Image (cartoon, rainbow, N blue to C red):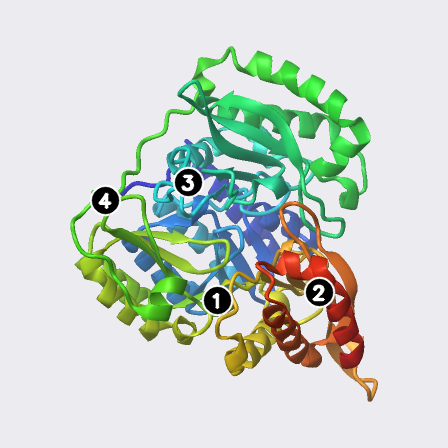
Amino acid sequence: MNLYRLPEGYEKVIDGFEAVLNSWLNGGTDMDEFRKTCSAFGIYEQKQQGTFMQRIRLAGGIIDSALLGSLMRLADEYAGGFLHITTRQNVQLHGVAPENLGKLQRRLANLSLLTKTAGGNCVRNVLIDPLSGVSDDDVFDVSPYGLELSNRLPEYPVFAALPRKFKIALSSSQEDRALCSIADLGLIAVKRRGRRGFAVYTGGGLGAKSMTGGRLMDFIPASDILIASLAFSELFAEYGQGVPRSQARLRFLIERMGRDEFYKILKGKLKRLSRDKSLKIKPKALGCARETRGGDFRDSEWTEQFVSAQRQAGRYTVKLPLFFGQIYADTAAQVISFCKKYPKTEIRFTQTQNILLRDVGTAALDDAKELAFAVSSLAGANGFLSDIKTCVGADFCRLSAASSSGLLKGIIDAAAADEELSSVGDVRIGISGCVNGCGHTALADLGFGGKAGRDESGERADWFRIFIGGSLKGIGVEIGELPALNIPAFTVDVLKKYKASGAVSFADFLADGGRSAAEALLKEYL
């Protein structure tokens, strides 16, 4: 399956990168200048001196078994032997030596995988609802539109020369599983008189000042999403310059301009760009496996938490839970083997940093369960534990103040060991190692944002700011902070109170005294 393609002349782009790389390796370019070049290619220094992270764009986390195998070979040859799935559905390679960065660009290009604009002040990886095309609530399948949009973006220089990063997301229903409400350009599928289109959302984003966005337009034709992307980016590039980096995101530009003025200028750009028919998106259908006959599959807790029936009769989507979003060689090999045995299977990487196997037939579910338990101990744990969103934290990131993976393991171990929590579900937890919120801290029911602190003896220790009540309807509220060592027990106690309350959702629990209870518990653990 040819999912991705590169813009014409991309070889020269890599030539330019290699020229800067070689100049830096030979002392002709300083580190600051090299960093500027690297970031635009999704390359960042790691905490481990002399190593780099390489981010790779995968629109909507869409990948097939052959491409997964190729990426694992590159991870083994050039990086740490694993792939890391991010909360933006793309992947990262960690531990790349600087002398291998140029070779890696060319090897990835041979796979038609783009690294230019995987970082820096660019339009980042396009998010796509991972259940689009198979969910009962689909308005229509947005995956082909998001994939084609992602393939078209590199054709236009403006997308790689913005004041700051710019994020696009496509959801197939009002459930907004791609989180359009926190995107710079969010596109939620709608139909008007039978015609496919999108409602347009803007003004959201996560970071030091997180906020949710709102609906700007009720309908644009589905074929006009590249036009909309260009209009937004042109406006951003034209009016978003000359401000401090912390104020250079689109949501702050909208605040400065005012929403009405922003929309007035945007409409002018949309009108002009709409005259160019070459900008129309013409997606190619990805297709789904046909409906099949067969009895329903029942397997108690595993089915309830990790398997969902598709709208195609006899087909299922299976979640393979991963710890910390890491895919190692043995996991990849087993997934590839399953896909060879059941070639209709589709693979998606999710924002919760797991693998989805789509279009799995009833007859394959026993093998899917065996696969899940073979690759992850989380397959036997409460489902929400494998959906905890987590940035790479201090394990790799130079910006991180605290270990996200350490806290993740602590929470999983503590919650899994408590039988009272076995029936708790639908709790969203996010962990970030710093204020940037890559783990969606501000959107979580319980969010933890890392900071440097001290233990009782005065030694440096990981601490986390604690947020509660975040969702796409509003950003979570900070209620205090705790040392990392105390957070797993605090989390377990909060979840026990939630379960004991009988509330239908965590949001209802917080609204009916749960926030006060959490704040009281926090004081006990300080």
Q: Is residue 286 visible?
A: yes
Of the two numbered discs 3 and 4 on the same chain, state the one appearing first in sequence. Answer: 3
| Side of 352 where 459 appears, left or right | right
Describe the element under mark 2 as helix, strand or loop: helix
Callout 3: few (<14), some (14-19), or many (20+) C-alpha neighbours within 10 Å? Answer: some
| CA gap, disc 4 and disc 1 | 27 Å
| CA gap, disc 1 and disc 2 | 24 Å
Describe the element under mark 4 as helix, strand or loop: loop
Task: Measuring from the top left, give residue 181's x and y in whole percent.
Answer: 61, 41
| CA gap, disc 1 and disc 3 | 24 Å
Farthest residue toward the front? 502
Which residue is found at the position 64% from the left and 41% from the top?
A: 121
| Side of 99 where 68 appears, left or right | left
Mark 3 or mark 2, whichever is nearer to me: 2
Callout 4: few (<14), some (14-19), or many (20+) C-alpha neighbours within 10 Å? Answer: some
Residue in front for this viewpoint, 31 or 5: 5
Q: Which residue is mark 3?
A: 137
Of the two numbered discs 1 and 2 on the same chain, state the one appearing first in sequence. Answer: 1
Farthest residue toward the bottom? 457
In the rendered view, tell whether residue 189 sits above or below residue 31: above
Quarter of the image that includes the N terminus? top left
Q: Which residue is mark 2?
A: 514
Q: Which residue is mark 4?
A: 289
Quarter of the image that includes the C terminus? bottom right
Mark 1 or mark 2, whichever is nearer to me: 2
Q: Which residue is mark 1?
A: 386
* CB-based contact (under 8 Å), mark 3 and mark 2: no
| CA gap, disc 3 and disc 2 | 31 Å
